[in-house]
Image: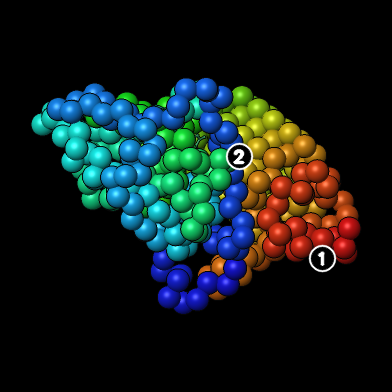
């Protein structure tokens, strides 16, 4: 999707705008099967706890909002039209107690999915309890009948299938924040994607010197420009790692988690990525000749420049007939990436 000059300022760093008709389903894709009528509760530190049917909730008065959504896996959609009830209206009714400082949003989902925000941020961001998108009821996979839409934060702060809103004195980390190290503040303009663990930097340096990261959990490890040819990173957790321009010829990343890792302009010739997670990873300009991506998860992976890239960025990855990239893996790529891949390989 070409982005005009004015729109570019509306796309946070390292996000790409999806074509209008594409809206990926991220995370859970259906609510918990449950015969009970759908209600939304406001509970915890409030003067007036509420349990509302969806009709009652709608009756509080719906508004339309145009919101830009930004997923942590690097896609954005601008100007999305949602309709629903401003959360502020519900909070006014429930009357949070003075000690309430956080809001936890819980989903009617099998794993009890949740996320949280400081009450102050909720007041500033003015989220919507949404029933409609683009003039139609929200699709079930996108959180219908009712979801949160929180502008100004990565989309993981917007729970699908809203069931309860709980006011708390202390924060309670949400599902992705607790399980997957997603950043609790989630500001896309500050790229608050993942929490970088407090690494024991000596241990990391030793592991890198020995070129063995196998099985280690090194969120956000910084390896830009390093010579790590032959690295063994089998089964390592390397989300958000920075391997830009690194020399990684013959490296083994089998079964590793490299989601959102930066591998631009890296030498990955002969490297092995079998069954690795490369979701949201950036491989533009990387040398992938002789690399093996069998069974890799490539949702949102970038190998080729996108029309939305600023000028002067990395070029296309070097992919040739010696690159093993089976059709099942390529099927998860975006249309733009898949077309460029087919062209690079002479149309297969
Ligand atoms: N209940 C529930 N809500 C959720 C999630 C989830 O897994 N379960 N994933 C979050 C994430 S990471 C994103 S990007 C958006 C995705 O919404 P979509 O599937 O409508 O694109 O929902 C958020 N809300
Ligand atoms: Mo997300």
Comparing marks 2 and 1, which lies closer to the viewer? 1
Earlier-in-chain disc, 2 versus 1:
2
Q: Residue at x 59, y 68 (%)?
A: 1
Front-lying residue, 294 or 236: 294
| Residue 97 appears anywhere in the view | yes
Question: Is 311 rendered above or below residue 122?
Answer: below
Q: Residues within 10 Å of mark 2 (few under 14, many from 20)?
A: many
Image location (x, y in percent) of residue 93: 19, 37
Furthest residue to the left? 98
**Mark 2 vs ligand 2: CB under 8 Å?**
no
Image location (x, y in percent) of residue 332: 71, 47
Q: Is residue 73 left or right of residue 115?
A: right
Q: Residues within 10 Å of mark 1 (few under 14, many from 20)?
A: few
Q: Mark 2 touching mark 1, by CB under 8 A?
A: no
Q: What residue did someone put label 2 on?
A: 258
Give how far apart the Cα atoms at labels 2 and 1 are: 26 Å
Q: How is the image coloured?
A: rainbow
Q: Quadrant of residue 237?
A: top right
Question: Is 52 rendered above or below residue 193?
Answer: above
Q: Residue at x 61, y 60 (%)?
A: 21
Image location (x, y in percent) of residue 291: 79, 46
Question: Is 132 rendered above or below residue 7?
Answer: above
Badge 1 marks a residue whose secondary structure is helix
Front-lying residue, 119 or 63: 63
Image location (x, y in percent) of residue 96: 17, 33
Q: What residue did someone put label 1 on?
A: 343
Q: Residue at x 43, y 75 (%)?
A: 6
Q: Is residue 293 left or right of residue 279?
A: right
Q: Is residue 255 left or right of residue 328?
A: left
Q: Residue at x 77, y 37 (%)?
A: 295
């Amino acid at each position: 999707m070409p982005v005009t000059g004015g729109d570019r300022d509306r796309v946070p760093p390292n996000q790409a705008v999806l074509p209008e008709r594409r809206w990926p389903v991220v995370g859970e894709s259906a609510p918990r099967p449950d015969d009970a009528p759908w209600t939304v509760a406001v509970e915890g530190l409030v003067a007036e706890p509420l349990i509302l049917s969806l009709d009652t909730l709608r009756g509080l008065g719906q508004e339309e909002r145009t919101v830009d959504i930004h997923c942590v896996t690097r896609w954005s959609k601008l100007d999305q039209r949602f309709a629903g009830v401003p959360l502020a209206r519900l909070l006014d009714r429930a009357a949070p107690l003075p000690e309430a400082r956080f809001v936890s949003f819980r989903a009617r989902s099998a794993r009890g999915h949740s996320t949280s925000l400081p009450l102050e941020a909720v007041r500033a961001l003015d989220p919507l309890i949404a029933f409609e998108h683009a003039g139609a009821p929200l699709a079930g996979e996108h959180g219908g009948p009712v979801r949160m839409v929180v502008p100004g934060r990565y989309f993981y702060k917007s729970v699908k299938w809203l069931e309860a809103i709980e006011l708390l004195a202390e924060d309670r980390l949400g599902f992705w924040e607790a399980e997957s190290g997603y950043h609790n503040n989630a500001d896309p303009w500050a790229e608050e994607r993942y929490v970088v663990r407090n690494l024991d930097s000596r241990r990391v340096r030793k592991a890198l010197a020995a070129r063995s990261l196998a099985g280690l959990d090194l969120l956000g490890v910084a390896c830009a420009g390093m010579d790590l040819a032959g690295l063994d990173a089998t089964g390592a957790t390397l989300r958000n790692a920075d391997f830009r321009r690194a020399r990684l010829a013959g490296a083994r990343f089998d079964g590793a988690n490299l989601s959102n890792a930066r591998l631009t302009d890296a030498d990955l010739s002969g490297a092995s990525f079998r069954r690795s997670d490369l979701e949201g990873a950036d491989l533009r300009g990387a040398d992938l000749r002789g690399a093996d991506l069998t069974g890799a998860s490539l949702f949102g992976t970038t190998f080729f420049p996108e029309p939305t890239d600023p000028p002067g960025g990395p070029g296309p990855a070097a992919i040739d007939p010696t690159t093993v990239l089976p059709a099942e893996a390529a099927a998860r790529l975006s249309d733009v990436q898949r077309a460029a891949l087919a062209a690079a390989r002479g149309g297969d």
